[in-house]
Amino acid sequence: MRAQIITLTLNPAVDMAATAAAVRPTHKIRTFDERLDPGGGGINVARVVHALGGDALALIMTGDVTGHLVEELLDEAAVRWHALHIRGRTRISLNVHDRQSGLEYRFVPEGPNVEADEWHGILNVLRDVEAEWIVASGSLPRGVPADFYAQAAAIAAERGQRFVLDTSGAALRAAVGHGLELLKVSLGELEFLISRELADPRSQEEAVTSLIRSGAVRMIAVSLGRDGAILGTGDGIHRLPAVSVQERSAVGAGDSFLAGLVLGLARGMSHRDALAFGVAAGAAAVVTYGTAQVRPGDLEVFYREARGEPETADHPPSPLVAPHRSENVPEDIIKTAHQVADRLRQRGHARLAAHLRGVLLERRAAAVLLTAVREACQTVVAAVEAIDPVSATMVEELRLEVDMRIKEPRGREVKYN
């Protein structure tokens, strides 16, 4: 079992997301726009790393029919995985967006009970995996001791692997000081670790510096939500503001931030640029519905903004993302869509251009990709038709061309997978 980045998820979930007109007590709430995603901290990290062109494998514990569904959903996302099957049943989480209030409701079960032989089995697997980075993210299920991550980190340290942890509570406290390369925490979790409130940037940075100098961990990343993020290393503190975006769903945003940060470090980015990559990945997650959904085109724009270098017509996006190429894609449509995205960017619509470009970079079957391009065109037209009729007409022409390709008679159409 080999990958550059292996993620560990002991308590995965089938994540169901849906929208409701309004959430009211005692009423039967009708939902729409339902989607299922494989969820759990490590799984989310692996999915985002994969979406950004990285080499990831998800090591998971799954049980019963819901566990098999997690595996199927990972297959659909083209994310490599290795599962140890347990006797309990993998949990199902529910996230509902209330359209009337704009609020998001998240229901997260505690998950199955894991027996000693099952969690020992995961430790045995870790003794054999080949990876540069091991990323453990998420809660520990019932039955797993609080020092499990400390044991896993010690195994990784013995094998010369970099161990990254994102967890909370007793498991977080138990793991500190056991060979962690990178610890990712929220502000609340950092305050929990040092047992005091950190009300201002100076106290936050002093706490991070103190933990690093004590030898408890080599690097600490602190996600601060709308206030951005901190990365502390032996060389000092880096702090970046958040990217200003319209939030649609926060599910998996922290995992997306961690995925971008670790992937940036694995690719040899400077600490500051890796932090910017993480901030951009977190922002890209919150502008979409579902769990840890990151569009590569969004990330390229947000990365420049995180570094203080907004994309302009004279500053085209860099090849940050190494896309996984879709098969049997109609190249003429893809070429035209890229040209349209370039022209949108030149006309001052950088984020909309990134949205369209991000769809083109995602790995999908050709027929699904065409449908996604059509939907992206509709989104762009709706956004610009009142302020830029020229751009709206250009994108509408692309949508019509895609429509014609989708509706071509069976005898003449390209055979899509």
Image (spheres, rainbow, N blue to C red):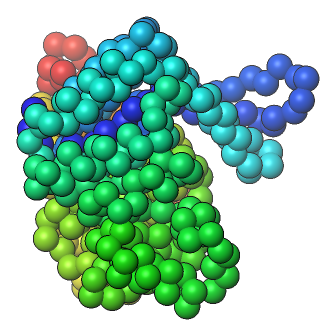
Q: Residue at x 63, y 79 (%)?
A: 198
Q: Residue at x 45, y 52 (%)?
A: 174
Q: Residue at x 26, y 78 (%)?
A: 271
Give the quarter of the image for residue 86. Answer: top left
Picture quarter with the C terminus? top left
Measuring from the top left, give residue 254's x and y in whole percent: 47, 56
Left/right placement of residue 223 relative to residue 60 reads right
* Number of callouts: 0
Give the quarter of the image for residue 145. Answer: top left
Left/right placement of residue 16 relative to residue 414 reads right
Measuring from the top left, give residue 75's x and y in whole percent: 26, 24
The reply to whether residue 59 is in sight is yes
Q: Nearer the viewer, residue 187 or 102?
A: 187
Residue sitting at the far right: 26
Measuring from the top left, give residue 311's x and y in whole percent: 33, 79
The reply to whether residue 343 is in sight is no
Give the quarter of the image for residue 212. Answer: bottom left
Picture quarter with the N terminus? top left
Measuring from the top left, give residue 140's x and y in whole percent: 47, 36
Q: Is residue 275 above or below residue 81?
A: below
Q: Nearer the viewer, residue 347 or 287?
A: 287
Left/right placement of residue 136 relative to residue 318 reads right
Q: Nearer the viewer, residue 13 or 206?
A: 206
Q: Nearer the viewer, residue 333 or 187?
A: 187
Q: Residue at x 18, y 23 (%)?
A: 416
